[in-house]
C-alpha cells in the first residue's frame, strides 16, 4: 500500500492490552505534521476501484482522518492499495473492486465501539460464523485482528455492557519510546462504574466473564481482549498499547474519540478500472 502525504506505517501484528496507568502520565502529543509532498495520482490497475470522498467538516484534520479511514478498512478485512488526500476536504482511497460494497457501508458511518466480556476463545472447526454484534444485547462472535487485518483469534462475546458514549476522550501518549492510546471514561453508571462492574466479574471469573477477559470491539472487529488482573480501575487509567507509531496511535484515538468525523464524509463518486 502506498501512502502519500503521510508517514503512517502499519505494523504487521499488533498485540493490544488494556492496563492501569498513572493519571499523571505524560501529556498527549500533537499529531505528526505531514512532510511528504503530494505525488501524482496512481493509475488504477485491473480489478481496482477508487473512492472519491469529501468531508463537510470544518475542523477535520484531513491527513489524520485519511489514516483513520485506512485503519478502519484494513482492520475490517478490506486491504487498501493506495490513499491520497488534498486540502481542504478530499480523500481518495484505492481498494479491490470486490470490496466496494463493504467499503461503501463503512466509509460514511460512525464506527460503533463496545465493551464486552469474552465468554470463549474459539478454535479449529468450532469457530462458527462471524456474528457482527449489531444487536448489543445479544452474544456475538467476532475476530480479533492485527493492524494488517490478519485474524489473531475468534472470540465468543457476551452482550455489550458499555458503548462509545461512555468514553469522554481518547488521546495518544508517548510512553517508553512508543505510543499508546489513553481512554478516559465518564463518571458513574454511564462510564467507569459500569466498566468496573464488569471488571469485577472478570477478575472473579464468574459465569458472566469466565475467561477474565474484556473485549474492546470497533465495528465488528476486536481491537483488544486483555485479561483483567485487578477488580477495578480509575476512570482515566485505561490504555491501548501495541508498539504504535505516533501516526498509528493518533489515528486510532480519532476512531475512538470522534467517530462522528466519519459521518461528515460523503462518497462523491467511484471509478473502477
Image: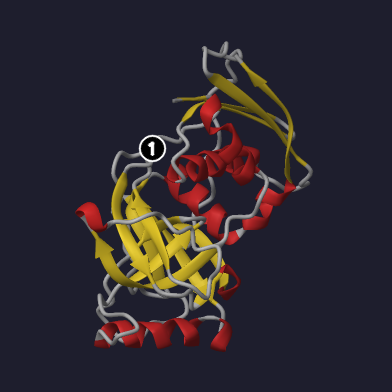
Q: Nearer the viewer, residue 23 or 15?
A: 15
- Asked whether residue 64 is in view, the answer is yes
Whether residue 26 is visible to the viewer of this picture, yes or no, is: no
Q: Is residue 21 above or below residue 133?
A: below
Colouring method of the image: secondary structure
Q: For label 1, count other residues whose C-alpha is less than 10 Å away and answer few (under 14), some (14-19) or many (20+).
A: some
Look at the picture and state if 217 lies above or below 249.
Answer: below
The residue pinned by badge 1 equals 10
39 left or right of 154?
right
The quadrant holding residue 207 is: bottom left
- The number of numbered discs placed on residues in the rendered structure image is 1
Q: As rendered, which of 188 and 48 lies closer to the eye?
A: 48
* Quadrant of image for the C terminus: top right
Against 196, residue 3 (above or below) is: above
Residue drawn at point x = 26 percent, y = 64 percent: 121
Residue 138's spot in the image, x, y percent? 49, 73
Q: Residue at x 47, y 43 (%)?
A: 247
Q: Secondary structure at mark 1?
A: loop
Q: Residue at x 54, y 20 (%)?
A: 48
What x and y, as percent, mark residue 265?
71, 43
| Of 131 and 181, the residue lying toward us | 131
Residue pushed farthest left? 124
Question: Which quarter of the figure is the N terminus placed in?
Answer: top left
Amino acid at each position: 500500500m502506498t501512502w502519500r502525504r503521510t508517514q503512517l506505517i502499519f505494523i504487521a501484528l499488533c498485540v493490544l492490552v488494556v492496563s492501569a496507568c498513572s493519571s499523571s502520565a505524560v501529556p498527549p502529543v500533537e499529531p505528526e505534521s505531514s512532510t511528504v509532498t503530494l505525488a501524482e495520482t496512481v493509475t488504477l490497475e485491473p480489478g481496482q476501484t477508487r473512492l472519491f470522498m469529501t468531508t463537510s467538516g470544518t475542523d477535520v484534520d484531513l491527513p489524520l482522518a485519511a489514516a483513520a479511514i485506512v485503519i478502519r478498512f484494513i482492520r475490517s478485512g478490506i486491504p487498501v492499495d493506495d490513499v491520497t488526500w488534498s486540502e481542504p476536504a478530499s480523500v481518495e482511497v484505492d481498494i479491490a473492486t470486490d470490496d466496494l460494497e463493504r467499503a461503501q457501508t463503512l466509509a460514511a458511518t460512525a464506527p460503533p465501539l463496545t465493551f464486552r466480556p469474552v465468554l470463549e476463545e474459539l478454535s479449529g472447526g468450532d469457530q462458527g460464523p462471524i456474528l457482527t454484534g449489531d444487536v448489543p444485547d445479544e452474544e456475538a462472535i467476532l475476530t480479533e485482528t492485527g493492524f494488517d487485518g490478519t485474524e489473531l483469534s475468534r472470540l465468543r462475546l457476551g452482550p455489550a455492557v458499555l458503548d462509545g458514549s461512555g468514553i469522554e476522550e481518547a488521546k495518544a501518549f508517548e510512553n517508553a519510546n512508543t505510543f499508546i492510546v489513553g481512554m478516559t471514561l465518564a463518571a458513574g453508571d454511564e462510564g467507569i462504574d459500569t466498566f468496573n462492574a464488569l471488571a469485577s466479574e472478570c477478575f472473579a471469573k464468574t459465569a458472566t466473564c469466565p475467561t477474565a477477559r474484556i473485549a474492546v470491539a470497533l465495528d465488528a472487529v476486536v481491537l483488544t481482549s486483555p485479561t483483567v488482573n485487578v477488580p477495578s480501575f480509575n476512570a482515566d487509567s485505561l490504555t491501548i498499547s501495541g508498539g504504535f507509531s505516533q501516526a498509528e496511535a493518533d489515528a486510532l484515538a480519532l476512531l475512538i474519540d470522534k467517530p462522528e468525523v466519519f459521518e461528515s464524509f460523503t462518497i462523491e463518486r467511484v471509478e473502477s478500472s
